[in-house]
Amino acid sequence: MTTVPVPVVDFDTSPDRYRHWRLEVDGQLARLVLDVDPDGGIVPGYELKLNSYDLGVDIELHDAVQRLRLEHPQVRAVVVNPWKVNFCKFSNEALLEIEDASARSGQTWIAALNGPTAGGGYELALACDEIVLVDDGSAAVSLPEVSLLGVLPGTGGLTRLVDKRHVRRDLADVLATKAEGVRGRTAVEWGLVDDAVPPRRLDEAVAARVAEALARSDRPAGAAGVELTPLAREVDADALRYAHVTCTIDRDGGAATITVHGPEAVEVPAGVAEAHEQGAGFWPLAFARELDDLVLRLRTNELEIGTWLLRTRGDPGTVAALDELLLAHPDDWLVGEVVGCLARTLKRLDYSARSLFAVVEPGSCFAGTLAELALAADRSYMLDGLREEDEERGLAPATLTLTGMNLGPLPMGNGLTRLQSRFHGRDDALAAAQRLAGTPMTAAEAASAGLVTFTPDDLDWDDELRLALEERASFNPDALTGMEASHRFAGPETLETKIFARLSAWQNWIFQRPNAAGPQGALRRYGTGQRAVFDRKRV
Amino acid sequence: MTTVPVPVVDFDTSPDRYRHWRLEVDGQLARLVLDVDPDGGIVPGYELKLNSYDLGVDIELHDAVQRLRLEHPQVRAVVVNPWKVNFCKFSNEALLEIEDASARSGQTWIAALNGPTAGGGYELALACDEIVLVDDGSAAVSLPEVSLLGVLPGTGGLTRLVDKRHVRRDLADVLATKAEGVRGRTAVEWGLVDDAVPPRRLDEAVAARVAEALARSDRPAGAAGVELTPLAREVDADALRYAHVTCTIDRDGGAATITVHGPEAVEVPAGVAEAHEQGAGFWPLAFARELDDLVLRLRTNELEIGTWLLRTRGDPGTVAALDELLLAHPDDWLVGEVVGCLARTLKRLDYSARSLFAVVEPGSCFAGTLAELALAADRSYMLDGLREEDEERGLAPATLTLTGMNLGPLPMGNGLTRLQSRFHGRDDALAAAQRLAGTPMTAAEAASAGLVTFTPDDLDWDDELRLALEERASFNPDALTGMEASHRFAGPETLETKIFARLSAWQNWIFQRPNAAGPQGALRRYGTGQRAVFDRKRV
């Protein structure tokens, strides 16, 4: 394995390598403790720039959430002592992963706040199911971003206050403008925490909640977890290669080609027991982990690569056979977790600020789970017929196939399937597409069903794709980001899409403004003893 | 009347003074024609800066929509030939007013596109119920903002494509990146327009749609409209005075005090017939028009006045009596229109980027319709008991009273009442508050019902209010804008809130970015023959 010595952000970690958290698993209970650097202070808030320390906290949090679900299926309650997190898309995703674990994995997350909990620390607590605050006359929860830093609690803080914890909007206004926060019984009355107890009763109060959580969970008691072994990854200057996913980067064109290599027939387990035996090697799990890692690395380390081409290679029938296995065992805990991994990885594509083009060619396997890649794309190109080289290789024309995996198990953040989002408000077209599940569609059939955008034949294929890529690379990438975010999520909004679509957009805007980021702005002046100077115009 | 000769934007207009539109009313049909300046060119898009010409187009459009509803109740169909509009909050509101007229006033708005319709012009068409495009081989609908200007079709364009017209997301992607737009049958197939007809058939096709619209409308046939007489307004350097609303500006404090003077008993009509006779003088209509004008002027001309204090003076019982009249005649067309005006004016408060503080004191009349001002506020202060000066004036302690007007007729943009938004997810608290309708509440009672934020007594009142105002004025106004927008709209999202909360936030962000607004940005370079230079990093 080659490792290129460039300063890239790496998302690999494991509990024995954590620098910021300590993960303790004790039977059905886990504890996630921030290993506090005593010199770090308790100053709330986040840095404007990508800060490797801050991102490191989230990388470890993300890793811990995954391992608690897959390696420790017996865990029913997680007690967390939050400290701080920073604001970035990955932080938002990490907190949503906690809520996903609550919703899908029968885990109760309990935030035990034994001291002042400010900013991102309280945002992390808000992502938990229950919050217990010590009532010692000084401990408070606070969101001091507006008052101290001139920015927003952008990791879902504002949205979770009113939309999740149902804090009254005027009390939310008071909290979010009060640097010192809210303590004790008032915090309970306002709905900011669930309980406030004297220091001597904190452990007991948390233990009571843990006991209730353990009793009501349906997590499997005696199940053996799946060890999340390190990903094998080969990194070159312009390529990343995993077992099932490869990526090549065209720096001049500003585009990356992501190719998923579908499962071989021999990789499909005979039954769910064999899937358990395969563990981290079970194809859907291995694929999801690799694609997730690739997306995170491209997002973080390849900022100028604005377009991602999504391709697949393999046998659509084998993908469909694996889908069938997943669909046949919805109550198996591992199958549930694997489907959850797939769902979260696909959501990460939806939330990536990159243009996604799917390319459906002969030899590809856009079926079921992998057809979601085409449905996640901003547009898709499907070759109608064969090119000379396809004929030489004896390939059949490309097909696109829906399976049951496209009809429910892999929802987007808005709660709809990608098919439902695609045909939002067009129930007939949706029903017609759903009826085609199980039928491999030619380019003409897929186009007629509204599942692909363009179906050039071999004469036009190369030029059309090349021109589309050149054109995309010529546009203002910021405008593309806003446009794509607007088009991807038709229909209803959820807490999750509100956080990405509304709160993040406001926060992005505020971060660009001189009042926050300018030389005299609040972010620059914080901690200097100088007051920020604001242009008072409301816009 | 004193007029101060400062360069303020004025929102007064009437059809005889329109500079940009021609409004023709012909029985049940109205036509709204843009009076094209032949030198204006057909270049699509909007200006970065507030452009008095562009805003002028919207001011006239807003005026025309109001007059068609109130002065011409017989109008059932409106044919509009859109050209261009600019991007600003007021433009968004003006287009939403068209959709509100369709939804509430039995009017069908038909966009007849007899030539290329680009950018804001197509956004205006998207706000109409039906769109007919001439099919002459050149006429197209287009949204060239991304490709030519590096910004977004921010007046609802992207949201209306996928959420209103249910255009498939990949086709929306293609349209919004294709400067030349989409023509003829393809535009129909993609759902961009409802029909495409040869030039010789355009009038006939529009006439057929008009005939259908006239037949299905329930607009009153023989009703006499209400003439929207010019608002009497007195403007000083630091004050605006209308008949029922006054405003004083504290420039040092960055705050404006808006005082609504409630109706006198003699102003309450004996019945709905008398309300019709009162016409534009009917108190709720007069109040709504004045407050709307004030809000628009403060928003546009007083950018540094970041906090608005909302006060009322008068008799709560008289307000409640007027509410009763409105509630008793839901089927009367004028009552319907007046309630619609009140609803739209209150929404404009919700969408204003200003901190709203309600101040409930002895002598005030926060009842029913006027209690919505307190519910629209980001926080509220209600005096518990009396101050010395209140006792001297023989005043009773302040009360807050809900009426039926708080329980449905004045929804926010999210489709909920302000009470429902306030108690989102807390159904018990909502039901308890609703049961209090009709009962004047003291400060303690209103606080206990969760309807006010703070209830200082006379000892604390002055200091608490002063400190709150000083503190608010010390914060980054941009952070306040993002925070307030996030707190005001708990719960569900609608096309309307998506346009304000998501699309506008993205557009605001993009407008701050060097790629759009910088010296080499797309907006600056457009039309110069030079290509924009982009930082290609995706963020």
Image (cartoon, coloured by chain):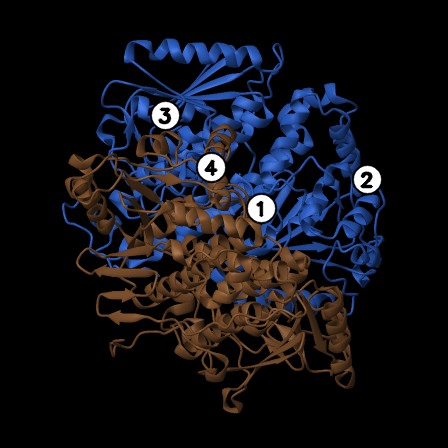
Chain colours: A brown, B blue
> Please, what secondary structure does the residue beneath circle 2 have?
helix
- Say which residue appears at 72% left-offset and 47% top-offset: B313
The answer to whether the residue labelled 3 contacts the one labelled 2, judged by CB atoms less than 8 Å apart, is: no
**Kind of residue at badge 4:** Ala
Q: Which residue is mark 3?
A: B189
Q: Which residue is mark 2?
A: B317
Q: Can residue B252 be seen by looking at this rendering?
A: no
Density class for disc 1 (Cα within 10 Å; few <14, some 14-19, many ≥20) is: many
Q: Which residue is mark 1?
A: B349
Q: Nearer the viewer, residue A346 or B195?
A: A346
> Please, what secondary structure does the residue beneath circle 1 have?
helix
Q: Are marks 4 and 1 on the same chain?
A: no
Residue B154 placed where, x, y %?
40, 43
**Kind of residue at badge 2:** Gly
Residue B481 is left or right of residue B121, and the answer is right
Mark nearest the camera among 3 and 2 is 3
- Say which residue appears at 42% left-offset and 30% top-offset: B126
Q: Which residue is mark 4?
A: A437
